Image: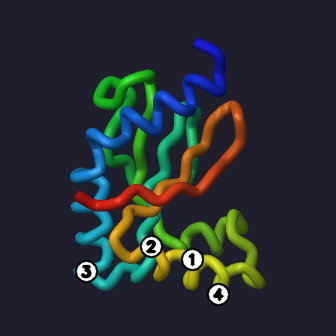
Amino acid sequence: MPKAEDFLGLKDQLKAYIGVMDQAATVIKDQGVSKYPIMVVHRQEVEIGIPLAFEHNLPGQWSMNASTLEEFVSKKIIEDDKIEDFRILYKQHDNHVCIFILSELGAQFIFFEKR
């Protein structure tokens, strides 16, 4: 499958995991860890977040970690001058789960509507 099609296929596959991602985001918020949880979906080794699912659990050898805005800032994935822009965007998607997809095609934030 070409890479672009693979990426689009991943978006469809993630719909099945929205409940797990939403539950993880809720725990992060409820425990006061962060007001801005971010789910990281990746194929390569990453040093961000806490693993939620491993390759054998997600189709296409994808893994999923739970992270936060604060960790993204501390690792310089989101620059200090972009924090407020991110918070505004995040709040505009209050009924969504924030997902950061890291693939051969690059990195992208997407917001999936909660069920």
Q: Residue at x 60, y 43 (%)?
A: 102
User: Tag 2 or tag 3, which sits nearer the N-term?
Assistant: 3
Q: Residue at x 65, y 27 (%)?
A: 4
Whether label 1 touches label 3, CB < 8 Å: no
User: Tag 1 or tag 4, which sits nearer the N-term?
Assistant: 4
Q: Nearer the viewer, residue 94 or 37?
A: 94
Vertical placement of residue 16 versus 73, above or below: above
**Circle 2: is it few (<14), some (14-19), or many (20+) Cα within 10 Å?**
some
**Circle 1: is it few (<14), some (14-19), or many (20+) Cα within 10 Å?**
few
Q: Position of residue 46 (x, y in %)?
A: 57, 44
**Circle 3: is it few (<14), some (14-19), or many (20+) Cα within 10 Å?**
few
SS at badge 2: loop
Give the amino acid at mark 1: Leu
Q: Position of residue 73 (x, y in %)?
A: 64, 74
SS at badge 3: loop
Q: Nearer the viewer, residue 39 or 8?
A: 8
**Real-space CA distance between mark 3 and mark 2, rounded to the nearest whole angstrom:** 21 Å
Residue 110 vs residue 20: left or right? right
Tag of residue 109: none
Residue that label 4 marks: 84
Whether label 1 touches label 2, CB < 8 Å: yes
User: Tag 4 or tag 2, which sits nearer the N-term?
Assistant: 4
Q: Position of residue 61 (x, y in %)?
A: 44, 24
SS at badge 4: helix
**Circle 4: is it few (<14), some (14-19), or many (20+) Cα within 10 Å?**
few
**Real-space CA distance between mark 4 and mark 1, rounded to the nearest whole angstrom:** 9 Å
User: Tag 3 or tag 1, which sits nearer the N-term?
Assistant: 3
Vertical placement of residue 67 versus 79, above or below: above
Whether label 3 touches label 2, CB < 8 Å: no
Residue that label 3 marks: 31
Tag of residue 89: 1
Residue that label 2 marks: 93
